[in-house]
């Protein structure tokens, strides 16, 4: 079994956790920074001209009444379609990347490879149009393709390595993923403010180049410090661990207990489709709603629309420690993972109730803009839902997955998220057709129904976990602390 070197703990956790924290932070700065401006970039007239998306491309008569408004709607819909396709595939490839790491490379090499490929993808997106005349569309798709492939290697494997820092039954694991999740959101704050500001105030392609530099910083950090703080974690493919001679974990058949645990992962992953279909409106329909339907002017200065997406990661940072300590303080009354998921759905629904309020404020008046507080409230509720679902889900997969399928099942977790992202784009396009009131209201109802179903299924799902959410042995924790204290002296 892989193990980290005994370099001591920091804040009660192995120091390797914080190396993974900062590596993921730079990667998420790159990803969310790009995501925050991508739809806005694609929906501009300048980008449309470079890509050849004129009115004729969408079958619009330039001389017809309302042609400009129809053209902007077409550009928005086109941007959402491309974002949805990208967001789906970026979560499909982790299945392949997880399998590759489990069976061939190990997690460590996979995340380095993925990081380099993603940096190249950002640089392709950021290549100025003037440098590649006639090839603008090709470079955009090249950049997206590299980001999709690179993410497949990176995403499931760094999350798996977090779980590998802890022994089975260690109650610190949920807290570790919450801390790790703070790194994800610190990175997204940097992305929205740094990449978003550069993109919206200067040039969108400069924003993509900045995102690429952020990704390279994450790779450099991992290369420089991994051996010291992670030891041999992630160096040996999981399928080659735990067996005698040439046989390893890959040769062992699944037990009935392991099959039940896999069922739990797949069922709860299915419910994440509904959550992310609503949550990921942030990059699409809610982003466009912020840009065109929300009053963003303060004392004569217009705030970049992409900044609103930073509300979510800011409140992740503020609320994550509160949620983590709240779960611990509840003791035996702490909800199990399925019920935490259900709470996540309820908070998602409340967020869209707030968006319904925004839609009611603007009504049918094209000149009326919604107050920004509606979107802020929506993002805060969504953040609370995310804290009940996403880090808990990552922890759950690392607890329940059989050794030989750990990264593969982590990849499957992200695959279902990808389906949710694609569904988010399709739902987002309904805002332009059915209107924001019907669309946001429908998502709220869907979230509440999913939460009720999960709550009712919770006891059965916990039975299938076969005690995986047990407590960590306190005596063992004390022995580990004494051993580490002795080493530091």
Image: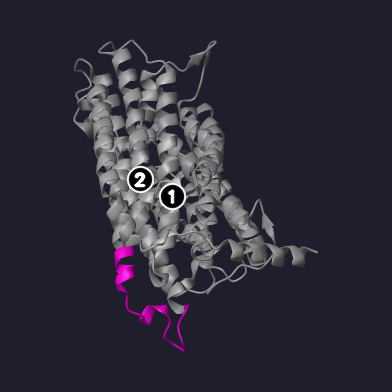
Q: Which residue is mark 1?
A: 392
Which residue range is magenta in the image?
A: 241-261
Report x, y in % for residue 14: 63, 59
Quarter of the rendering occupied by the C terminus: bottom right
Looking at the image, can residue 279 be seen? Answer: yes
Q: Depth check: give the residue in front, 464 or 92.
A: 464
423 magenta-colored: no
Of tags 2 and 1, the one toward the viewer is: 2
Residue 345 is drawn in which quadrant?
A: top left
Which of the two labelled residues, at mark 2 and mark 1, occupies the earlier sequence position? 2
At horizontal 54% and vertical 62% (from top left) the residue drawn is: 112
Report x, y in % for residue 55: 25, 28
Report x, y in % for residue 255: 32, 74
Q: Depth check: give the residue in front, 253 or 116.
A: 253
Q: In terms of secondary structure, where does tag 1 sit?
A: helix
Residue 3 is drawn in which quadrant?
A: bottom right
Count numbered badges in the picture: 2
256 magenta-colored: yes
Q: Are marks 2 and 1 in contact (CB under 8 Å)?
A: no
- Residue 339's tag is 2
At horizontal 28% and vertical 31% (from top left) the residue drawn is: 444
Badge 2 density bin: few <14, some 14–19, many ≥20, Cα 10 Å? many
Badge 1 density bin: few <14, some 14–19, many ≥20, Cα 10 Å? many
Kindly report the distance in space between the C-alpha atoms of the residues bearing marks 2 and 1: 11 Å
Q: Depth check: give the residue in front, 308 or 378.
A: 378
Left or right position of 206 against 63: right
Residue 187 is drawn in which quadrant?
A: top right
Looking at the image, can residue 84 be seen? Answer: no
Left or right position of 138 against 27: left
């Amino acid at each position: 079994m892989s193990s980290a070197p005994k370099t001591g703990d920091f804040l009660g956790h192995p120091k390797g956790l914080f190396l993974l924290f900062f590596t993921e932070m730079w990667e998420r700065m790159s990803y969310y920074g790009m995501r925050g401006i991508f739809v806005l970039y694609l929906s501009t007239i300048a980008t449309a001209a470079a890509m050849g998306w004129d009115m004729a491309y969408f079958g619009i008569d330039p001389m017809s009444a309302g042609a400009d408004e129809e053209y902007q709607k077409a550009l928005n819909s086109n941007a959402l379609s491309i974002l949805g396709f990208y967001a789906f595939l970026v979560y499909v490839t982790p299945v392949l990347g997880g399998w590759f790491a489990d069976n061939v490379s190990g997690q460590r090499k996979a995340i380095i490879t993925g990081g380099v490929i993603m940096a190249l993808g950002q640089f392709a997106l950021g290549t100025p149009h003037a440098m590649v005349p006639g090839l603008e569309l090709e470079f955009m798709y090249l950049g997206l393709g590299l980001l999709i492939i690179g993410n497949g290697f990176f995403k499931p494997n760094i999350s798996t390595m977090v779980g590998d820092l802890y022994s089975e039954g260690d109650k610190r694991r949920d807290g570790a993923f919450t801390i790790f999740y703070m790194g994800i959101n610190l990175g997204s704050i940097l992305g929205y403010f740094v990449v978003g500001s550069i993109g919206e105030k200067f040039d969108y392609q400069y924003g993509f180049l900045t995102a690429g530099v952020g990704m390279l910083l994450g790779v450099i950090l991992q290369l420089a410090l991994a051996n010291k703080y992670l030891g041999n974690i992630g160096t040996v493919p999981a399928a080659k661990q735990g067996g005698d001679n040439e046989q390893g974990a890959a040769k062992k058949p699944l037990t009935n207990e392991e099959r039940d645990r896999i069922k739990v992962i797949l069922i709860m992953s299915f419910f994440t489709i509904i959550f992310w279909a609503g949550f990921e409106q942030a990059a699409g329909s809610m982003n466009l709603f912020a840009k065109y339907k929300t009053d963003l002017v303060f004392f004569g200065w217009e705030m970049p629309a992409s900044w609103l997406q930073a509300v979510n990661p800011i409140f992740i940072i503020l609320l994550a420690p509160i949620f983590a300590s709240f779960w611990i303080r509840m003791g035996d009354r702490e909800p199990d993972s399925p019920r935490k998921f259900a709470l996540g759905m309820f908070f998602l629904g409340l967020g869209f109730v707030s968006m319904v309020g925004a839609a009611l404020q603007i009504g049918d008046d094209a000149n009326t803009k919604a107050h920004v507080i509606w979107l802020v409230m929506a993002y805060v509720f969504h953040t609370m839902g995310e804290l009940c679902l996403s880090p808990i889900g990552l922890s759950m997969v690392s607890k329940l997955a059989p050794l030989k399928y750990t990264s593969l099942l982590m990849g499957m977790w992200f695959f279902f998220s990808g389906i949710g992202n694609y569904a988010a784009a399709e739902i987002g396009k309904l805002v332009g057709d059915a209107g924001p009131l019907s669309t946001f209201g429908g998502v709220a109802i869907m979230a509440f129904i999913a939460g009720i179903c999960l709550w009712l299924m919770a006891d059965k799902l916990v039975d299938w976990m076969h005690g995986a959410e047990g407590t960590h042995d306190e005596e063992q924790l004390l022995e580990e602390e004494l051993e580490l204290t002795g080493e530091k002296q």
